[in-house]
C-alpha cells in the first residue's frame, strides 16, 4: 500500500463532528495512537495499518492485557511512551525483560489506572478502544473526557454506558468512529443522507456455524464446534457470541446509541456470505449498502483516516456478488437476539445485565460447565431479576455490572435470585 491524499469535502452527515478535518491535499501530521487491547485481533490489525502507513500513524501507547510475550515484541518494535499490563506482576516481569533486552524509555503501568493513563496521555490524539468486555470502559470514557478521538471496537462499553459516553462525546466535541464492521458500514452509508432521512438500518449477520443445525442438537453443541466461525477470525468470547447471535444483540444496542435510533429502527438480517456489512434504508426507499473484503484492517483504516479515504490494496472481488442471501433471523433458534431487543427497549441496567450475564455464561460454556443453550437461559434469568434503574455515572455502571455478574454466578450455581 502507498499513500496519496485527496482534498476532502465534508459529507452531508457525520456521526460526530470530527476534529482536525483535512483542509488540503498535503499528507497530515502523524497521528499519535493509543491502542487499548494491543495484543488482540483488532490491536494487532491496527499495528499492521501503522506498518503500512508509517507517515500517517504511530502507536505511542499500548494496553496489552496478559500477553507478555507479544507485549515485549510490540515494545521492542514500536518503543511506545507507555504500556499497561493487566496486573502488577505482569508489569514487573515486562519491565525486567525490557531491561534485559536493552529497551529503555518505556513507562510500564498496570491495571485499570494504567490503562486510563495510556488512553489519556497528552501526546495521544486517537484512541483505539479494543479491550473486550467492560474492562476497557473506564479508559474509553476517560479518553472521551480528555478530548481524544475514539476508534470504537469495544461494543460492550457502548452497551453498558452508551448514554454516558455519547453525552461526554457531545460535551467535549469528540468523534466516536465505529470500527466494528457493521457499525463502520452504517457510518459510511449515513454519509449519503441526513439523520432525519433514515427510515431504518439493517445489521447483517452471518448466522454463525449453527444457522442450519437442527434445534434438537443445540443442547449438545461443544465449545470446539461453536468456535468455528464460518467467516471471521475473532477472539473466543465474540466467536461464541456470534454463534448465539448475542453479538448481534449487543450491536443493536450499540447502533441505537451511536446513531440515536430507537430499537424498532434497527433491524437484523442473516446474510451468510458476509459480503454486505450493513445497510441504511432512507425514507424515499433508497437503500445504501457497504461492501468490502472481510478484513478488519479496512474499517480500522477508515476510522483512522476519517474524514479522508486513503488508497489501499484491500480490494473487493465483484464476483463475490454472484450469490447473495438474506433471511429473517429465527428467534427460537437464537433467543439471545430476542433478549437483546428486550434489553434495548428497557435500557439502563438491563443493557448492563445483558452483557454481564453473557460474559459469565460464555465463560462457563467455554469451561464446559454450561450447555450452549444454557447461555440464553442464564441471561434471561438475570434480566428477569434486574431492577429498572438508570446509572448516573461510570461508578454506578460498574456497580450494576458487578451485581449482575454475582446474580449470573448464582444462577449457574442453582441459587434462587431476587433483588
Image (cartoon, grey):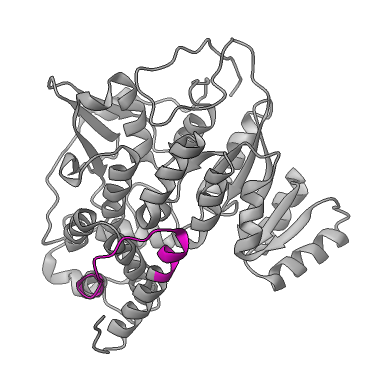
As for residue 175 lying within the magenta part, the answer is: no
Q: Is residue 274 left or right of residue 58?
A: left
Nearer the observer, 306 or 418: 418
Q: In this view, does 223 lie to the left or right of 72?
A: left
Q: In the rendered image, which quarter is residue 69 located in?
A: bottom right
Q: In the rendered image, which quarter is residue 185 located in?
A: top left
Q: Is residue 202 left or right of residue 166?
A: left
Is residue 296 in view?
no
Magenta residues span 378-399
Q: What residue do we see at 73% from left, 51% from top?
A: 82
Position in image of residue 255 (x %, y %): 30, 43
Count the marks. 0
Position in image of residue 364 (x %, y %): 36, 77
As for residue 392 lying within the magenta part, the answer is: yes
Is residue 275 in view?
yes
Q: In which quarter of the image is the C terminus?
A: bottom left
Q: What residue do we see at 77% from left, 46% from top?
A: 79
Q: What residue do we see at 72% from left, 66% from top?
A: 91
Say above or below: 68 vs 296.
below
Position in image of residue 386 (x %, y %): 25, 72
Nearer the observer, 145 or 185: 145
Q: In which quarter of the image is the N terminus?
A: top right
Say above or below: 310 vs 168.
above
Position in image of residue 324 (x %, y %): 19, 33
Amino acid at each position: 500500500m502507498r499513500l496519496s491524499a485527496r482534498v476532502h469535502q465534508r459529507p452531508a452527515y457525520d456521526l460526530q463532528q470530527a476534529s482536525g478535518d483535512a483542509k488540503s491535499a498535503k499528507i497530515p501530521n502523524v497521528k499519535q495512537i493509543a491502542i487499548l487491547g494491543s495484543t488482540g485481533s483488532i490491536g494487532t490489525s491496527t499495528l499492521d495499518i501503522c506498518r503500512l502507513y508509517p507517515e500517517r500513524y504511530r502507536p505511542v501507547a499500548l494496553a496489552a492485557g496478559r500477553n507478555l510475550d507479544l507485549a515485549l515484541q510490540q515494545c521492542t518494535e514500536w518503543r511506545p511512551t507507555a504500556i499497561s499490563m493487566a496486573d502488577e506482576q505482569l508489569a514487573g516481569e515486562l519491565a525486567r525483560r525490557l531491561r534485559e533486552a536493552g529497551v529503555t524509555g518505556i513507562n510500564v503501568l498496570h491495571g485499570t489506572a494504567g490503562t486510563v493513563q495510556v488512553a489519556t496521555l497528552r501526546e495521544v490524539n486517537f484512541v483505539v478502544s479494543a479491550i473486550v468486555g467492560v474492562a476497557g470502559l473506564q479508559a474509553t470514557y476517560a479518553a472521551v473526557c480528555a478530548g481524544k478521538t475514539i476508534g470504537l471496537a469495544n461494543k460492550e462499553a457502548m452497551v453498558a454506558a452508551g448514554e454516558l459516553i455519547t453525552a461526554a462525546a457531545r460535551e467535549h466535541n469528540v468523534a466516536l468512529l465505529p470500527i466494528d464492521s457493521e457499525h463502520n458500514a452504517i457510518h459510511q452509508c449515513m454519509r449519503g443522507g441526513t439523520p432525519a432521512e433514515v427510515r431504518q438500518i439493517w445489521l447483517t449477520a452471518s448466522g454463525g456455524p449453527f444457522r442450519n443445525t437442527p434445534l434438537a442438537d443445540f443442547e449438545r453443541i461443544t465449545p470446539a464446534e461453536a468456535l468455528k466461525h464460518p467467516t471471521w477470525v475473532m477472539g473466543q468470547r465474540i466467536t461464541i457470541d456470534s454463534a448465539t447471535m448475542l453479538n448481534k444483540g449487543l450491536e443493536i444496542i450499540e447502533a441505537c446509541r451511536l446513531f440515536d435510533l430507537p430499537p424498532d429502527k434497527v433491524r437484523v438480517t442473516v446474510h451468510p456470505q458476509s459480503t454486505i456489512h450493513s445497510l441504511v434504508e432512507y425514507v424515499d426507499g433508497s437503500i445504501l449498502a457497504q461492501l468490502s473484503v472481510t478484513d478488519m484492517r479496512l474499517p480500522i483504516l477508515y476510522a483512522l483516516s476519517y474524514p479522508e479515504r486513503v488508497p489501499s490494496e484491500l480490494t473487493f472481488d465483484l464476483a463475490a456478488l454472484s450469490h447473495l442471501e438474506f433471511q429473517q433471523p429465527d428467534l427460537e433458534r437464537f433467543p439471545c437476539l430476542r433478549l437483546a431487543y428486550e434489553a434495548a427497549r428497557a435500557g439502563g441496567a438491563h443493557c448492563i445485565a445483558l452483557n454481564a450475564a453473557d460474559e459469565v455464561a460464555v465463560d462457563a460454556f467455554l469451561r464446559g460447565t454450561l450447555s450452549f443453550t444454557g447461555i440464553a437461559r442464564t441471561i434471561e434469568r438475570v434480566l428477569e431479576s434486574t431492577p429498572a434503574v438508570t446509572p448516573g455515572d461510570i461508578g454506578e455502571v460498574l456497580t450494576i455490572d458487578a451485581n449482575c455478574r454475582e446474580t449470573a454466578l448464582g444462577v449457574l450455581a442453582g441459587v434462587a435470585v431476587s433483588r
